[in-house]
Amino acid sequence: MTPDRHNEGFGPGRLALVLAGLLVLTTITVAVSTIELGPLKIFAALLIASVKSTLVLFYFMELGHAGRLVKISFVGTILVLACFIGFLFFDVAFR
Protein backbone atom coordinates (compact mmCIF):
# COMPACT_ATOMS: atom_id res chain seq x y z
CA MET A 1 0.00 0.00 0.00
CA THR A 2 1.44 3.33 -0.99
CA PRO A 3 1.53 6.19 1.52
CA ASP A 4 -0.87 8.30 -0.60
CA ARG A 5 -3.39 5.50 -0.79
CA HIS A 6 -3.21 4.90 2.95
CA ASN A 7 -4.41 8.44 3.66
CA GLU A 8 -7.48 8.12 1.41
CA GLY A 9 -9.55 6.69 4.29
CA PHE A 10 -13.06 7.78 5.06
CA GLY A 11 -13.62 10.75 7.31
CA PRO A 12 -15.17 10.49 10.75
CA GLY A 13 -18.51 11.73 9.44
CA ARG A 14 -18.88 8.86 6.98
CA LEU A 15 -17.74 6.32 9.54
CA ALA A 16 -20.28 7.70 12.02
CA LEU A 17 -23.00 7.26 9.38
CA VAL A 18 -21.94 3.67 8.79
CA LEU A 19 -21.96 3.04 12.53
CA ALA A 20 -25.45 4.55 12.77
CA GLY A 21 -26.56 2.32 9.90
CA LEU A 22 -25.17 -0.74 11.64
CA LEU A 23 -26.99 0.18 14.84
CA VAL A 24 -30.26 0.68 12.93
CA LEU A 25 -29.84 -2.67 11.19
CA THR A 26 -29.17 -4.32 14.56
CA THR A 27 -32.39 -2.81 15.88
CA ILE A 28 -34.25 -4.11 12.82
CA THR A 29 -32.75 -7.56 13.42
CA VAL A 30 -34.06 -7.58 16.99
CA ALA A 31 -37.47 -6.35 15.83
CA VAL A 32 -37.70 -9.03 13.12
CA SER A 33 -36.82 -11.72 15.64
CA THR A 34 -39.92 -10.86 17.68
CA ILE A 35 -42.28 -11.01 14.67
CA GLU A 36 -43.67 -14.38 13.63
CA LEU A 37 -42.73 -14.73 9.96
CA GLY A 38 -42.42 -18.50 9.78
CA PRO A 39 -39.70 -19.66 7.39
CA LEU A 40 -39.19 -16.11 6.10
CA LYS A 41 -37.60 -15.16 9.42
CA ILE A 42 -34.41 -17.00 8.43
CA PHE A 43 -34.22 -15.25 5.07
CA ALA A 44 -34.84 -11.86 6.68
CA ALA A 45 -32.11 -12.46 9.26
CA LEU A 46 -29.65 -13.59 6.57
CA LEU A 47 -30.46 -10.60 4.39
CA ILE A 48 -29.94 -8.13 7.23
CA ALA A 49 -26.73 -9.87 8.29
CA SER A 50 -25.46 -9.74 4.70
CA VAL A 51 -26.06 -5.99 4.49
CA LYS A 52 -24.33 -5.44 7.82
CA SER A 53 -21.31 -7.53 6.86
CA THR A 54 -21.06 -5.73 3.52
CA LEU A 55 -20.99 -2.38 5.32
CA VAL A 56 -18.25 -3.59 7.64
CA LEU A 57 -16.20 -5.03 4.77
CA PHE A 58 -16.42 -2.00 2.53
CA TYR A 59 -16.01 0.78 5.07
CA PHE A 60 -14.12 -0.56 8.10
CA MET A 61 -11.99 -3.16 6.31
CA GLU A 62 -11.67 -0.93 3.21
CA LEU A 63 -12.55 -3.58 0.63
CA GLY A 64 -13.58 -0.74 -1.69
CA HIS A 65 -9.91 0.26 -1.99
CA ALA A 66 -8.68 -3.28 -2.57
CA GLY A 67 -7.38 -4.59 -5.85
CA ARG A 68 -9.41 -6.37 -8.50
CA LEU A 69 -8.25 -9.87 -7.50
CA VAL A 70 -9.34 -9.32 -3.89
CA LYS A 71 -12.79 -8.18 -5.04
CA ILE A 72 -13.17 -11.16 -7.37
CA SER A 73 -12.16 -13.59 -4.63
CA PHE A 74 -14.64 -11.92 -2.26
CA VAL A 75 -17.52 -12.32 -4.72
CA GLY A 76 -16.49 -15.93 -5.42
CA THR A 77 -16.42 -16.71 -1.71
CA ILE A 78 -19.88 -15.21 -1.22
CA LEU A 79 -21.26 -17.25 -4.13
CA VAL A 80 -19.84 -20.49 -2.73
CA LEU A 81 -21.22 -19.67 0.72
CA ALA A 82 -24.64 -18.93 -0.80
CA CYS A 83 -24.58 -22.33 -2.55
CA PHE A 84 -23.72 -24.11 0.70
CA ILE A 85 -26.50 -22.34 2.57
CA GLY A 86 -28.93 -23.13 -0.25
CA PHE A 87 -27.99 -26.83 -0.16
CA LEU A 88 -28.43 -26.79 3.61
CA PHE A 89 -31.94 -25.38 3.28
CA PHE A 90 -32.87 -27.98 0.66
CA ASP A 91 -31.48 -30.78 2.83
CA VAL A 92 -33.47 -29.68 5.87
CA ALA A 93 -36.64 -28.95 3.89
CA PHE A 94 -36.85 -32.34 2.14
CA ARG A 95 -35.98 -34.71 4.96
Image (tube, rainbow, N blue to C red):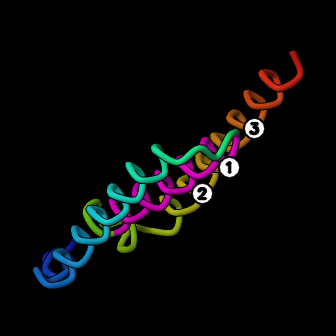
Q: In the picture, residue 24 is in which quadrant?
A: bottom left
6 relative to 80 in the view: left or right? left
Point out which mark residue 75 bears: 2
Amino acid type assigned to the residue bearing label 3 in the image: Gly
Q: Is residue 9 above or below residue 75?
A: below
Q: Label 3, label 2: how many angstroms apart (C-alpha)?
A: 16 Å
**Quadrant position of the C terminus in the picture:** top right
Q: Is residue 46 magenta?
A: yes
Q: Position of residue 2 (x, y in %)?
A: 20, 74
Q: In the picture, residue 64 is in which quadrant?
A: bottom left
- The residue that appears at 48% across and 51% down in the rendered structure is 32
Residue named by callout 1: 79
Question: Magenta part of the protein: which range?
Answer: 39-58
- The residue that appears at 51% across and 63% down in the rendered structure is 71
Residue named by callout 3: 86
Label 1 Cα neighbours within 10 Å, binned few <14 / some 14-19 / many ≥20: few
- The residue that appears at 58% across and 52% down in the rendered structure is 44
Q: Main secondary structure of the magenta part?
A: helix
